Every structure is written in structure tokens, then in C-alpha cells.
Image (tube, rainbow, N blue to C red):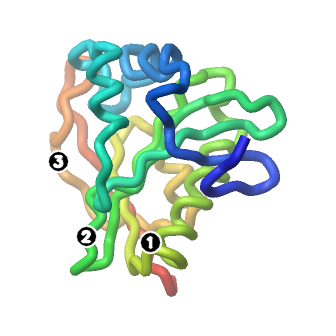
Amino acid sequence: MKYFLEDEIVGLRKIELTDDLTRYHQWFNSQEANKLNTHGIFPMTLKEIQDYISVNSRTNLHLSIFIKETKEHIGNLSLQSIDYINRSGELAILVGESSCWGKGYSYKACKLLVDHAFNRLNLVRVYCGTSEHNFGMQKLAFKLGMLEEGRRKGAIFSQGEYLDILEYGIFRNQ
């Protein structure tokens, strides 16, 4: 399998319409996988997933995460809202396979994408936001070298309550 970006453990590549999208479709509709983000509020059809991945854009880079040893597709990540004037982009990730949570795959995948953002796309800042209850994403942001930049009070409705969104960012020469 050819990857766009890779290290010794994970490989990242653009998901294709010819790929088996069953798992991807399940992840976006999984309440467990999406309880701390804004996916899973409305069900997504397979057609909507296909439309989403078939958009060609220079402002959104959507990639699939594979474990290289097993060639297992475990999730997706993106650098979205790429702004070439302000030279920034937003990092987002969804590891849908719960058996892969907490094993370092997210860090490895995000590290590859952040390095690509700085060294190939010539961005100077990568940022992300996450629910105040998403401790895994908060830990990931810190492990990537991001600093907490702010808090949007009551900005996300999840699990029956309004939660704050914590904002994180990293600069190329940080």
C-alpha cells in the first residue's frame, strides 16, 4: 500500500471512493466514537460520506490512518480550513476503532500531518479545539507541543449540557 505520509508504525493516505467505506460510515454514526465532538448528531448516509471525501480542495487535506503492519484502517484526520494568507490550519482527528484508542496512533498520525503543514505547506500555525471533557484530545494536543490558547464558554452542546471548547495551537518555531 502506498502512503502519502508515513513513519514506521502508521501510514496516511487519501481515502478513495473505491475503498471499502463501511467502517468510515460506521464511525461517523457511532455515538461512542463521537460523544465528545460534533459528529453523530445527525446520521450520515454512505452517499454523504462519499460526497464528503470526493471534494477536491486546497483548503482541506483529509487523510485516512492505517496501521502499516496490518494495513488496518483505524481512523481519519485532516488539516482543514487551511488559510494561506494567515498561514494556519485546523487539525482534526477521529480514531473510530476503539481498540486503537490510547495506543499512540493518534499522536503518530498527527505528528506526521503537523510536520507536513510546517515543512511542505509552509504554514506557521496549526490549531485545534476540543470539548473540555475530551481528555484524550487535550493530552494529544500537549504531546504535540500545543499550548492552550483560550476557552470558548458553553460553545458545544454534548451529552445534555453545554461544554466549553478548549483551544490549542502550535507555531512552527515554537
The structure residue drawn at horizontal position 19% and vertical position 29%, both measured from the top left corner, is: 157
* Badge 2 element: strand
In the rendering, which numbered label is found on residue 153? 3
State the residue position of label 1: 170
Which is more N-terminal, label 3 or label 2? Answer: 2
The structure residue drawn at horizontal position 60% and vertical position 23%, both measured from the top left corner, is: 97
Amino acid type of the residue that numbered disc 3 sits on in the rendered structure: Lys
The structure residue drawn at horizontal position 61% and vertical position 47%, both measured from the top left corner, is: 12
In the rendered image of this protein, does residue 45 appear above or below residue 15? above
Amino acid type of the residue that numbered disc 1 sits on in the rendered structure: Ile
Task: Give the number of the mark in front: 2 or 1.
Answer: 2
In the rendering, which numbered label is found on residue 83? 2
Which is more N-terminal, label 1 or label 2? Answer: 2
In the rendering, which numbered label is found on residue 80? none
- Asked whether residue 135 is in view, the answer is no
Which is more N-terminal, label 3 or label 1? Answer: 3
Amino acid type of the residue that numbered disc 2 sits on in the rendered structure: Asp
Task: Give the number of the mark in front: 1 or 3.
Answer: 1
| Rendering quarter of residue 164 | top left
Q: CA distance from mark 2 to mark 1?
A: 15 Å
Tell which of 78 and 152 is nearer to you: 78
In the rendered image of this protein, does residue 92 appear above or below residue 83? above
In the rendered image of this protein, does residue 17 appear above or below residue 62? above
User: How many neighbours does mark 3 have within 10 angstroms: few (below 14), some (14-19), or many (20 or more)?
Assistant: few
User: How many neighbours does mark 2 have within 10 angstroms: few (below 14), some (14-19), or many (20 or more)?
Assistant: some
Callouts 2 and 1 close, C-beta under 8 Å: no
- Asked whether residue 12 is in view, the answer is yes
